[in-house]
Image: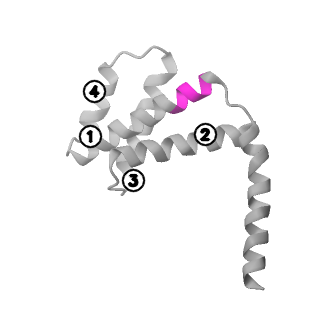
C-alpha cells in the first residue's frame, strides 16, 4: 500500500513538472544565467583560494562589462558567495546557481 502511495505521488509530481519544463526560456535569459553562474563559480574559486572579499570586489570594479547592470550584479553575486559558509567546489556552485536561475525564470513566466 505504501509503495502505491509513493508511485502516485511521484507520478503527480512528474505530471506537474512537465508543463514547467515545456515553457521556453529566452536566449537572453539563458545567457544571463550562464554569465551569473560563471561569476558565482569564479567568486567561489576566489573565496576558497583565500582572496579577501575586498580584493575580489576591487577586481570586479576594474573589470570591463558589456552591460551597465553587470558590474552591480557581479558584486552582489560575489558578496553572497563570500557570505555563504559553503565550501563546495566552484563547479558545484556554478551548477547550483545555474539551476536556481533557470527555475526562477521558469517560475516567473
Residue on which the image places disc 3: 84
Which quarter of the image is occupied by the C terminus?
A: top right
Residue on which the image places disc 2: 102
Q: Position of residue 70 (x, y in %)?
A: 47, 23
Q: Position of residue 2 (x, y in %)?
A: 74, 84
Range shown magenta: 28-33
Q: Earlier in the sequence, mark 2 or mark 3?
A: 3
Kind of element beneath mark 2: helix
Please report contact status of discs 1 and 4: CB closer than 8 Å, yes or no.
no
Give the mark toward the camera: 4 or 2. 2
| On screen, residue 91 above or below 60 | below
| On screen, residue 74 above or below 83 | above
Give the mark toward the camera: 2 or 1. 2
Q: How much space separates mark 2 and mark 3, taking CA atoms?
A: 21 Å
Residue 32 within the magenta-colored segment of the rendering: yes
Q: Position of residue 12 (x, y in %)?
A: 79, 62
Q: Which quarter of the figure has residue 64?
A: top left
Left or right: where does residue 19 sit relative to residue 39?
right
Q: Earlier in the sequence, mark 4 or mark 3?
A: 4
Label drawn at residue 46: 1
Residue on which the image places disc 4: 59
Amino acid at each position: 500500500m505504501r509503495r502505491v502511495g509513493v508511485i502516485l505521488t511521484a507520478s503527480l509530481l512528474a505530471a506537474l513538472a512537465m508543463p514547467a519544463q515545456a515553457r521556453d526560456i529566452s536566449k537572453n535569459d539563458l545567457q544571463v544565467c550562464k554569465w551569473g553562474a560563471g561569476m558565482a563559480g569564479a567568486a567561489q574559486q576566489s573565496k576558497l583560494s583565500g582572496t579577501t572579499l575586498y580584493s575580489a570586489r576591487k577586481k570586479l570594479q576594474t573589470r570591463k562589462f558589456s552591460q551597465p547592470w553587470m558590474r552591480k550584479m557581479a558584486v552582489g553575486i560575489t558578496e553572497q558567495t563570500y557570505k555563504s559558509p559553503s565550501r563546495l567546489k566552484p563547479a558545484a556552485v556554478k551548477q547550483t546557481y545555474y539551476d536556481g536561475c533557470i527555475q526562477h525564470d521558469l517560475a516567473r513566466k
